[in-house]
Every structure is written in C-alpha cells, then in structure tokens.
Image (cartoon, rainbow, N blue to C red):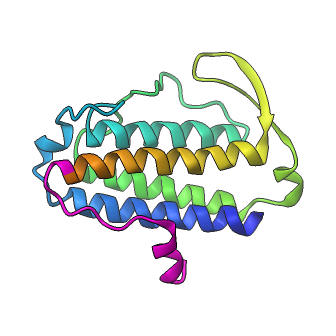
Amino acid sequence: MISHFQLMARYNDWANRRLLDAAATVPEDMLWADRGVFFRSFLGTMNHLLVGDTMWLARFKGEPPPEGLKLDSVLHRGLEPFRTARQVLDESILAFTRSLDESRLASSLAYRTSAGQQTETPFSGTLFHVFNHQTHHRGQAHGVLTGLGAKGPELDLVYFIRLGG
C-alpha cells in the first residue's frame, strides 16, 4: 500500500503542474471568474485544494493546522505565487509518503475537523480520501479552464503511469 500512496503523491504533483501550465495560457483575471463550481472559480478551487492539503498534511504529521484556515480561504491571489506554494506543498506530500510505514497505515488518525469536532478515522482510508479529494477538485478546475477556452491537459492517472509514473 505504501507504493500506492507514493504513486498518488507523484501523480498529484504531475497533475498539478500540468493544470497550472494550462492555466498560464488564460488571462489571470479570468482565473477568478465565477464559473458556478463549488469554490466558484479556477483559483478559488485550487486555493481550496491548497488549504485542504495543508490541513491534512499537518494532521497526518500530528500537528495542528495553521490558525485561521477555512476551506474557502484564499492563500494566493496570483497564479505564480500560487504555483510556487503548490510546488512546495507537493514536495512536502512526496516527502511525507516516502516516510510512511505499514504500522502508520494500519493506525487511526485522531484530529479536529475544520468545524472543530474531535474525530478519529482510519489513517490509510483518510489518506485515500485526500488523494481522491484532489482528483475531484482538479476535475472541476479542469472544467473551468476548458470553459475559459484553455486546452485542458490530459490528467487521467493512466497517462501518468504510461509516462513511467
């Protein structure tokens, strides 16, 4: 299972880079255009992923998430500062998955939800959730980009695997 999570971390990094490269072909103000998705715009959606991944990574490391983060927080308004922050976080996710061991995957994760409730979930299932969450919202962001006229890149996992994933 460890190799699966490491694959997903590499895929996440690859897919984010491809999506952000496509976003760079669209005027930056359009990346904030409300397109009817849950977090309204391309950068609204991508900021949500940055926030969620930051919160989850802190929880996985046994640390409290940064104070004041909300699921709709905007951490970076500009594409390039966002891209830099995303790359740093993706490197942290890659490093985290390299540190996993079977006992950690078999454990439970106790944490506070974004609503402040104390809860506990299976660690491996929760890590699966994080990678699934990324794919879900990247799909929304991809749809927004194509709706704005960008050429949406192939993001299916199988394309990454064919490249040697």
Q: Is residue 152 magenta?
A: yes
* Screen quadrant of the C terminus: bottom right
- Image-based side of 160 in relation to 6, left or right: left
Chain part drawn in magenta: 147-165
Q: Which residue is drawn at 51% across and 37% down?
A: 52
Residue lying farthest top? 116
Q: Between 100 and 131, which is closer to the camera in this rendering?
A: 131
Q: Please tell me which residue lies in front, 20 or 65.
A: 20
Q: How many labels does the image show?
A: 0
Q: With respect to residue 151, does 63 lie above or below?
A: above
Q: Is residue 95 left or right of residue 109?
A: left
| Residue at x 26% of width, y 64% of height | 21
Q: In this view, does 1 lie to the left or right of 5?
A: right
Percent of width and height locating residue 15: 42, 63
Image-quadrant location for residue 62: top right
Query: What is the quadrant of the N terminus in the image?
Result: bottom right
Residue appearing at x 84%, y 51% in the figure: 104
Tell me if residue 155 comes above or below residue 62 in the rendering: below
What secondary structure is the magenta-colored segment mainly?
Answer: loop
The residue that appears at 67% across and 37% down in the rendered structure is 59
Q: Where is residue 137 in the image (x, y as percent from the top left)?
A: 43, 44
Residue 135 picture location, percent across and down? 49, 51
Image spot of residue 56 (x, y percent) = 61, 39
Q: Is residue 67 left or right of residue 152?
A: right
Q: In which quarter of the image is residue 103?
A: bottom right
Q: Is-magenta flag for residue 109?
A: no
